[in-house]
Amino acid sequence: MVKGVSKQVIVVHSPEPRLFEQAIFILREDVQGVTDEALLQEAQQAIRAPLGDGKRRKLYLYGPVWACAGAILTGLVWLVTGLL
């Protein structure tokens, strides 16, 4: 049990409750003069915002690329040693 802590929170229900039922946002203490509608809009925007910088790295391509590079290098080494 925590004593002496008072926080204001906003609970936003998920538009697609497939994985998450709700999100809970804890308001900063230094925020003043913001309307309830603005707080709710900001919370809903945070839910829909993409994570990170929006650029997803295609990690699934690194394995095949390195495998092909290794195969080409092996073939070149075999070709060079076979010709000598």
Image: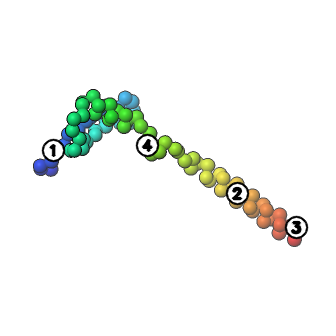
Q: Mark 1 sits on what residue?
A: 6
Q: What amino acid is found at the position of numbered circle 1 in the picture?
A: Ser
Q: What amino acid is found at the position of numbered circle 3 in the picture?
A: Leu
| Residue drawn at point x = 32 percent, y = 35 percent | 43
* In the foreground, 48 or 32: 32
Q: Earlier in the sequence, mark 4 or mark 1?
A: 1
Q: Height in image: 59 above or below 12?
A: below
Q: Which mark is residue 83?
A: 3
Nearest to the eye among marks 2 and 1: give it.
Answer: 1
Residue at far right of view: 83
Q: Earlier in the sequence, mark 4 or mark 3?
A: 4
User: Would you identify the image quadrant in which residue 22 lies?
Assistant: top left
Residue at far bottom of view: 84
- From the viewer's perspective, tell me whether residue 52 is left or right of residue 58: left
Q: Mark 4 sits on what residue?
A: 51
* 4 and 1 marks in contact (CB < 8 Å): no
Which x, y percent locates residue 59? Answer: 56, 50
